[in-house]
Image (spheres, helix red, strand yellow):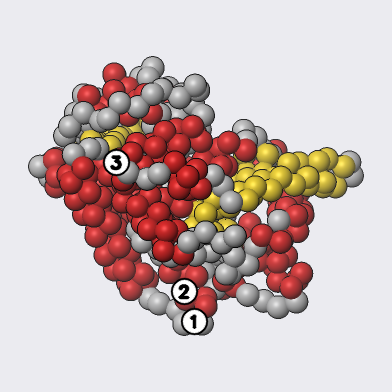
Amino acid sequence: MSTAPHVKAPMDEFNPFQAMAQRFDVAADRLGLDEGLREVLRTPDKELTVSIPITMDNGKLKVFTGYRVQHNFSRGPCKGGIRYAPDVHLDEVRALAAWMTWKCSVVDVPFGGGKGGVICDPRQLSKGELERITRRYTTGIMDLLGPDRDVPAPDVNTNEQTMAWLMDTWSMHVRRTDTAIVTGKPLALGGSKGRTEATGRGVMIVTREALKKLGLRPENARVVVQGSGNVGGIGAMLLAREGMKVVSISDIYGAIHNDKGLDVPDVLAYLKQHKKLEGYSKAEHIPSAAQLELDCDVLVPAATENQLTSKNAERIKAKLVVEGANGPTTVLADQILERRGVMVVPDILANAGGVTVSYFEWVQDRAGYFWTEEVVNSRLEHVITSSFASVEETARKYNTSLRIGAYILAVGRVATVYQMRGTYA
């Protein structure tokens, strides 16, 4: 693999929107896009900040802040999750919305990118408080939403129950039920079979395809998975089913490690019962930072942004990094890993299984006809494997990394559509 084109370090290595913009610029250079088109494609179409006043369980009023960013809808309705976290900020939501645009484009799904977030700590809130936040937030962003306009989904600290509340609130306002307003819903409300496992399944598929390129057999691959939720936990389980040895898993409190391999179903059962890995007796407990530097073949960062940085990239021992999370590798870390010959499967490809099956769910809701899980998984397999092949082919054509290959493919598709449609004035 060649050395990447020189990329200036962002003013802030840990600003996700600056990281997205830098990678976009490298792809735009390779595509020869003019500055005007670049400005259009890197700039969000709409940004909305809303205040969310809530009556707490103790009777007191508290105001939360929520965001919804629509990055681009030239290829179709905006699509993207809603996250609840105390560290949500507007630049993060902007970056995530842009990544959704490129992610949908990489897998050739006819959506644009959107993203939402609410600044709160769900661990400190009751179910009733979460419901009130969700319903008031939905009301605040009502004008942006619609099956043909903007279709939210679950993300960090949100789930199918959150989507059910959102769908119900939207439906009450428009005086009709339309299940296609959100994806990631419960099956009883028009959800898709296979949706919960989709992102983790996509991670497994690209890991398998990348191992082929590296000449490694799955049964010889030792895997470290950062995270244990829908992406990390399910991804670890599916990787183990493929014959890979998962030697480490983590949660927000720390990590566990067993060099002989973890019994992943047992770990996940313990986690479900105890809500944390603390106390699990069949593995060594290690700090989260040390987990990333374990000796392994495959590292799957499936937690949050900015985990692989200029501070630890030199110590990463994996031959392959598969980005289950959005933005886990900074621009400076990318340069270090590429110089060291580490293959990185970028987030906009590696975790695109979720949006792919979200698209399947939207299609099923609109048609009123639902597929079997076997059909969903088979179609997901086709989309992800063919997308990996397209990204790898683009990277070879432009003599660059898989990440820049993915950006070239994605940005090129969106730019072509924008140029064909023209600029309305």
Which residue appears at 73% of the width and 53% of the height? 137
Q: Which one is in front, 193 or 142?
A: 142
Q: Which residue is mark 3?
A: 30
Please report contact status of discs 3 and 1: CB closer than 8 Å, yes or no: no
Q: Look at label 3 and name its amino acid.
A: Arg
Q: In 3D space, how far apart are the residues under numbered discs 3 and 2 (Cα atoms)?
A: 34 Å
Identity of the residue furthest to the left in this view: 215
Answer few, some or many: residues within 10 Å of disc 1's Cα (few below 14, many 20 plus, some between 14 and 19). Answer: few
Please report contact status of discs 1 and 2: CB closer than 8 Å, yes or no: yes
Marks 3 and 2: which is nearer the front? 3
Answer few, some or many: residues within 10 Å of disc 3's Cα (few below 14, many 20 plus, some between 14 and 19). Answer: some
Q: Which residue is mark 1?
A: 367
Q: Which residue is mark 2?
A: 363
Which residue appears at 83% of the width and 40% of the height? 62
Q: In 3D space, how far apart are the residues under numbered discs 1 and 2 (Cα atoms)?
A: 6 Å
Which residue appears at 38% of the width and 24% of the height? 8
Q: Could you say where residue 172 lies in the image, as x and y percent from the top left?
A: 75, 71
Looking at the rendered structure, the secondary structure element under dot 3 is: helix
Q: Look at label 2 and name its amino acid.
A: Val
- Indicate whether 160 appears above or below 176: above
Q: Look at label 1 and name its amino acid.
A: Ala
Q: Locate residue 30: give its quadrant.
A: top left
Q: Which one is in front, 143 or 128?
A: 143
Q: Could you say where residue 351 lies in the image, as x and y percent from the top left?
A: 38, 49
Which residue appears at 59% of the width and 60% of the height? 425
Counting residues from the start of the chain, the first of labels 3 and 1 encountered is: 3
